[in-house]
Image (cartoon, grey):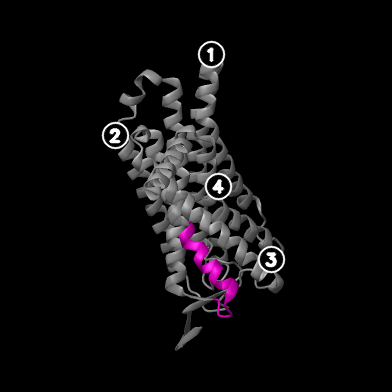
């Protein structure tokens, strides 16, 4: 909807096209995304509960993993419900305020997760390279500060980018060629000069991606050097197993971000952008709990003992 006010007009609602150009795929996509969404919510919630109930998991690594699961849980709730709704209803509108709120929270959780993964890399560096000083170096206070810092920085960056979008004028068309309020899709609808918004996005996204990757790469360079120097194969295997899950999560997360950076900004590339964004917003939050639970002995043992205790209590 567009409201006219004298010579000025402003958009009050947006229409999310989503995957409406493929009507025959609406029902199959709904079922697939609903299944992924269910696994995401259950998987991440289970990780959080498992970490809470097992005293053995009250360590910095699992403290950060719990927050990573919380971020994935929240992030999947920003985009997926609206995506599912738009696959089954004809009215695919979203209010201007709702669109900006969706962008703000989605952006906050993405940037926070980006730095949470960097913090987890630093944690693995301390655990492998300074195992005797690990509990001292990664104190509760430092862990809390690191986590608070990631949330604060994510919120601050997102607030800046959302403000840059709110400063623009939107006078139609109001059709977003996406399933959610993604930055470039919103920006393409602006009818005022988007230079400041584009510069803000470029500076913030480049700084965040470069700095988080730098921390991760530096941490793993030291980890690899330390592993190579280990005399026993048992220690080497243990060190590698503690990092394998995290490396897998990092590769998928940053791989899709870099893919989105490389996609040219043209009408023909919007389908690729949508598919990559689906992987980012829907699939990654489901993969992280699977990656960490399937490869983690402590998590699997806790889940088994929890299920067994519940079964015993019901059988009595």
Instruction: Where is residue 101? Give x, y as percent.
Output: 42, 66
Provide the residue span drawn in magenta: 76-92
Q: Mark 2 and 4 residues: CB-CB less than 8 Å, in contact?
A: no
- The secondary structure that dominates the magenta segment is helix
State the SS at label 1.
helix
Residue annotated with mark 1: 229
State the SS at label 2.
helix
Q: Nearer the viewer, residue 267 or 311?
A: 311
Can the viewer see residue 218?
no
Residue annotated with mark 3: 267
Instruction: Where is residue 43? Give x, y as percent.
Output: 48, 50
Residue annotated with mark 2: 140
First in sequence: mark 1 vs mark 3: 1
Crowding at dot 4, Cα within 10 Å, few <14 / some 14-19 / many 20+, comes out as: many
Which residue occupies the extreme front position in the image? 316
Instruction: Where is residue 78? Give x, y as percent.
Output: 46, 61
Crowding at dot 1, Cα within 10 Å, few <14 / some 14-19 / many 20+, comes out as: few
Vertical comparison of 102 with 207: above or below: below
In front: mark 4 or mark 3? 4
Q: CA distance from mark 4 to mark 1?
A: 32 Å
In front: mark 4 or mark 1? 4
State the SS at label 3.
helix
């Amino acid at each position: 909807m567009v409201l006219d006010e004298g010579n000025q007009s402003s958009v009050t609602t947006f229409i999310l096209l989503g995957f409406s150009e493929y009507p025959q795929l609406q029902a199959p996509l709904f079922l697939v995304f609903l299944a992924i969404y269910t696994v995401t919510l259950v998987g991440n919630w289970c990780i959080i509960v498992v970490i809470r109930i097992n005293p053995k998991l009250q360590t910095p690594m699992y403290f950060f993993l719990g927050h990573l699961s919380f971020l994935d849980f929240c992030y999947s709730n920003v985009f997926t419900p609206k995506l599912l709704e738009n696959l089954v209803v004809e009215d695919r509108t979203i209010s201007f305020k709702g669109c900006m709120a969706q962008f703000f929270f989605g952006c906050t959780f993405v940037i926070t997760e980006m730095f949470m993964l960097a913090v987890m890399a630093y944690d693995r560096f301390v655990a492998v390279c300074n195992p005797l000083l690990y509990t001292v170096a990664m104190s509760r206070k430092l862990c809390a500060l690191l986590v608070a810092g990631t949330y604060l920085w994510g919120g601050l960056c997102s607030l800046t980018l959302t403000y840059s979008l709110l400063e623009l004028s939107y006078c139609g068309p109001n059709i977003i060629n996406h399933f959610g309020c993604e930055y470039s899709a919103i920006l393409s609808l602006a009818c005022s000069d988007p230079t400041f918004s584009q510069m803000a996005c470029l500076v913030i996204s480049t700084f965040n991606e470069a700095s988080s990757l730098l921390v991760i790469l530096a941490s793993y360079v030291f980890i690899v050097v330390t592993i190579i120097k280990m005399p026993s194969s048992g220690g080497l295997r243990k060190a590698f197993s503690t990092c394998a899950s995290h490396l897998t999560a990092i590769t998928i997360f940053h791989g899709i971000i870099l893919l989105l950076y490389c996609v040219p900004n043209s009408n023909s590339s919007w389908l690729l952008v949508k598919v990559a964004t689906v992987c980012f917003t829907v699939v990654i939050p489901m993969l992280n709990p699977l990656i960490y639970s399937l490869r983690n002995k402590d998590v699997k043992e806790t889940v088994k003992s929890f299920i067994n205790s519940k079964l015993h209590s019901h059988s009595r």
